[in-house]
Image: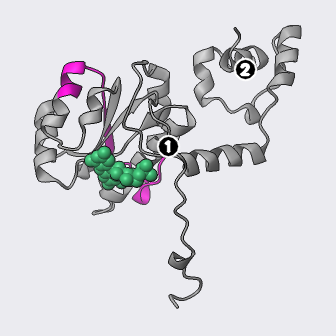
Amino acid sequence: MLDRNRALYYAYPCVNSPSEIAGFNPRAADPAPHGAAGAILAGLFPPLTLQEDIMEAMESILSRRSIRKYTGDAVPEDVVEQVLKAAMSAPSAGNQQPWHFVVMRERAILDRIPGVHPHSLMIREAPVAVLVCADPTLETHKGYWVQDCAAATENMLIAVQALGYGAVWLGVYPREERVTGIRALLGIPEHVIPFALVPIGRPAEQKPASQRYTREKVHVGRWQ
Ligand SMILES: Cc1cc2nc3c(=O)[nH]c(=O)nc-3n(C[C@H](O)[C@H](O)[C@H](O)COP(=O)(O)O)c2cc1C
């Protein structure tokens, strides 16, 4: 059966392969389709309107939940790459980008993480996990690396959701025993700080969007 990704590939010649679809923005694409079949498919999958793009972005943010159960399905390299692109698109103080990322797929390594992080058992079921690290020596604006790495981590979670996968933010920093344990496990240099772990997989649990909007926490103009 022709899936949506393959159909988009035929409909938009600017996409070189079905695996490029994850980062593909039909709104910005050349609509000239691949022949007659492409024309039909382009009709079935028209470019997104700006309004639809905005709705998809809001949907990913509002529906995101922590996913701690995963199917055995693999997470392809191109999905991880899209997630890392989202991470590195995050804002940072003075655009200092003080981050590094360790992509972990080796089962033996993933299985040892709960030994140094007590709330990470789900990582044993995840096919892949990304460790967000900070390198404070890259800072040009001292003291902001925590906020920069948090922005990158949140971007990852939203991208994972948008791509149809599930993830959870596992805090490492500032727990000293987790920082030193993960550093030793992965051979991370002393000056680099493991910040957060993000296991990623196909969701094996469904969670409703959480309604957290609280009018009382919004202060307009002044506090009272
Ligand atoms: C800084 C931070 C650290 C967290 N650490 C853990 C953790 O160690 N283990 C875990 O299972 N979840 C962890 N979480 C996920 C939170 O428990 C979760 O985001 C929160 O309960 C809200 O649920 P939701 O993500 O489904 O909306 C962490 C989240 C943040 C932002």
Q: Quadrant of residue 186?
A: top left
- Vertical relation: 1 (above or below) 90: above
- Residue 214: percent from the left, percent from the top? 54, 71
Image mark for residue 8: 2
Q: Is mark 1 within 8 Å of ligand 1?
A: yes
Q: Secondary structure at mark 1?
A: loop
Name the kind of residue labelled 1 in the image.
Lys
- Vertical relation: 155 (above or below) 186: below
Residue at screen point 11% across, 40% down: 181
| Residue highlighted by disc 1 | 207
**Structural crowding at the residue carrying mark 1, measured as other residues with C-alpha within 10 Å and reported as few (<14), some (14–19) or many (≥20):** few
Outermost residue to the bottom: 224
Mark 1 or mark 2: whose residue is earlier in sequence: 2
Q: Secondary structure at mark 2?
A: helix
Residues at marks 1 and 2 touching, judged by CB atoms closer than 8 Å: no
Residue at screen point 41% across, 47% down: 152
Q: Quadrant of the N terminus?
A: top right
For the rendered model, the colour scheme is one colour
Instruction: Find the magenta span and give its range.
Output: 88-111
Is residue 168 magenta-colored?
Answer: no
**36 relative to 116 in the view: left or right:** right
Name the kind of residue labelled 2 in the image.
Leu
Is residue 107 magenta-colored?
Answer: yes
Distance (Cα) linking label 1 and label 2: 29 Å
Residue 96 in sight from this viewpoint: no
Residue 93 vs residue 173, the one in the foreground? 173
Q: Quadrant of residue 143?
A: bottom left
Residue at screen point 17% across, 43% down: 118
